[in-house]
Image: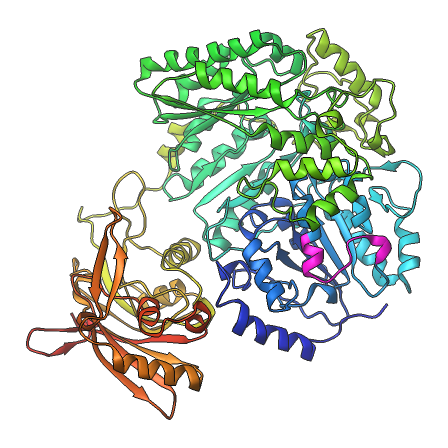
Amino acid sequence: MERLNHISTHQNSLIERLDKTFFPFVEKPLRFTGTERNILVKDHKNRVSICLAFPDIYEIGMSYNGYHILYNVINSKENLVCERTYTPEKSAGELLRSLNLPLFSLESKFDLKKFDFIGITIPYELNFTNILEILDLSGIPFRAEDRDSSYPIIIGGGSAVANPLPVADFFDIIILGDGEDITVDVLNIYEKCDSKEQFFEEINKIDSIYIPKMNGEKIVKKAVSDLKNENYAHTPIVPMMEIAHDRVSVEVMRGCTRGCRFCQAGYYYRPVRERSTDDVFKHVSTALENSGYEEISLLSLSTSDYSGINNLLSKLYKKYLNSKINISFPSIRAETFTEDIAKIAKLGRIGSFTFAPETGSLKMRRVINKNVSREIIKNCMDIIIPMGWRKIKLYYMIGLPTETMEDIEELKDEIYEFANYSKKHGKVDFHISISPFNPKPFTPFQWVEQDSLETFREKIDYLYKNVRARNIRVDARDPRVSKLEAVFSRGGRDQSHIIEYAYRNGAKFDGWTEHFNYENWEKVFQKFGKNIEELTKSFSLEDTLPWDIFDIGISKSYLLNEWKKSIEEASTEFCKRGKCTRCGIEKRFNCRSLLNGEKDLETINFDEIVKNLKKVENPSGEFVIYKYRVVYKKLDKLKYLSHKGFIKVVEREILKNNIDVSYTKGFHPIPDLSFGFPLQFGFISDCEYMDISFETNEDIENKIRSILSDGLELVSFKQVKRKPTPLTHILNRTEYVSLNIDKDLYIKAREAFKRFDENTHIVRLTKKKKEKKYFVKDFIESIKFDDEKCEIVLVFIYIESATIRMDELFKQLLDHTKYEFDSIKFKRVKSWFLDNEGKCHNPIDL
């Protein structure tokens, strides 16, 4: 089949248009520029190409671990190339449409239609309409039946398509379960085929592949048996802006057999597969070294159940005890939580600690097969509160099968019991999160009716009214969101028409509170003769369920037996540490062989580790630092990097390169850095200043060059006294020049600047929302015009560390549109100190 063999003239034109008409005007352009660290840009020539498209904004998609695994695995193959894109938020999507620009990949800025494949990972049912937003912005028909062979092949996957039927008609292929191996197989088969027809015939023979347009036999989900170390990103992509989970995420195991009857992931991702502690430790070490991140997150459905947890934590404690690295555990079970885990977590910043009792009554815990007693939670509190944690989050569900108002009353009593128990440790704040239960396919509760909105609201109102204390905050998720999730998670193929109609009538980003509109969804369902409440009623135990065409390895008879046991309040053993429960997955795997076979430490000897750590000798007993003032350029590549983002980049380069800078004192030490006045967003500069302190005075230039990464350029540096005057107290003049301004706008600006007088002023709001006037004449020392180059040179004055901003000035003088101002490129040329005698001083000499 024909390949995209070179960067076309069309692509060069697209890059130019994005630079001129999209990036300067879109909110948070770093979502789109592809300027992250460690991205992979491969030539498309003679390679099969896929663009991974995430159906949510950049900050969410970049935090999704499976996305990074696929990106790394595919790009590790010489014959394949993988790039990324994310769903533009609403205003960005409208800007693309208004400019007639297509959705594009971050790495090469290719139009998505130019790829062989588009892979859409769907983690959540309320992302469904965003699938259509991706296709619409790419100029691709929504339905597979409407796409001919000239369009890319659309692949779907992810946890929200355990039952893919509601969105099946939008995809050519849907991959069930683990995607890292099967996706590579699919792309390799495509490379060998002469036509798309032949390709679909070939992949239809493979397990885990669902081709909606080819009605075949039952689809068998395949799981990878080995979590290969090379599949993980040891050099992770590092964003230049803050994302939802801004850290290195390292998977320690996949799957869970605790058997919580509400949890789809616990059944869908069986069997449990564990990585060796050596692999995890190496992954943590290399990922931190190659990224500069200061936090590592150990991922799994239940990290404290990992067989080698103490071995791993012992190694991590030994390596990172005296570092600035935080180690977090996003999923911890109270019954396997230990003091050792708390000590490791305490290496980092102490925020809040989270546990999920799920229900408040012992009866309901037996129903859901999560037998966590109140005493276990109290024991956890006795560990973490004396160590410094003063905020505890507790997650509960309401609306579980057989639940009554008596159970809700017990939930209220449990919250108060925990709050009262904590008083012996002093003041502790509790954040209680309440989520309405949503029955999911492939769980023992897949048949049950969901509570009505009225019942959900009654339970939530009861908790709001009856759980009131100064140190307890209760938040409840909107039950209407859970209603829509339940409809989609157990829906059939007929729902694709409903989803498409809703999208065409404005539904997108439904998972975001500000965009979710339940009333509109009700109207859409009614148009198709459906009622949302009716669609969340129970299924008969004898019914053939829509998703029965998919075989995930867990037998339906096992799930039915678990449902009956829940009614009887009977427990099912944790098979990882007990005997096999015969769920069905044992017919495909020798489950024991997939676990970490190492003998784990019974406990971690922290004192011995500390004793054996090498101590740094300091014969003089004095702590000496060497402070330098650095001048550097901020180049065009980083013009959309905010000042806050720039500081984070510098801090990460310090960690990544193991630079011996000095740190501030206190509970949360950070590198001892100070900067000149922040550069306005979108500007470039020839003269930025930074003060930085080192613990040794050797190889300073190489250290500074290591810190000033790509997009920054060292100009000069000089050692200064230990406690120099802060740069913001020194600088009182700065010069800017306008670049690439078109002639008409230049003439308009020149005439406007000539007209301003002593009364021209800018109004700002103070912190108390009062208006304050800033007179332009007080802050502008000089204005020069170069008619030949169409350049404007302005010198600004800082008064008590304050000045006016360029955008404020242009708005006042030109009554400009945002488009006019943002189309101008500004450069800070120099900054200096002007003393009372009129002498100019270079900040590096002060």
Q: Report the residue that reaches farthest toward the bottom.
A: 788
Up-down: is 607 above or below 418?
below
- Front in this rendered view, residue 457 or 707: 457
Magenta segment: 133-146
At a point 36% along the width and 17% down the height, the residue shown is: 469
Pick whichever, 627 or 385, lies toward us: 385
Please indicate whether residue 843 sits to the left or right of residue 203 in the image.
left
The front one of 543 and 242 is 543
Q: Is residue 372 left or right of residue 696?
A: right
Instruction: Identify the image quadrant of residue 785.
Output: bottom left
Q: Is residue 134 magenta?
A: yes
Find residue 417 and report its horizontal and vertical position in percent.
Answer: 43, 10
Q: How is the image coloured?
A: rainbow
Report the quarter where the C terminus lies.
bottom left
* Residue 753 magenta-highlighted: no
User: Is residue 385 visible to us here?
Assistant: no
| Residue 838 pos. (x, y %) | 9, 78
Is residue 329 shown above or below 63? above
- Viewer can see residue 28: yes
Q: Quadrant of the N terminus?
A: bottom right
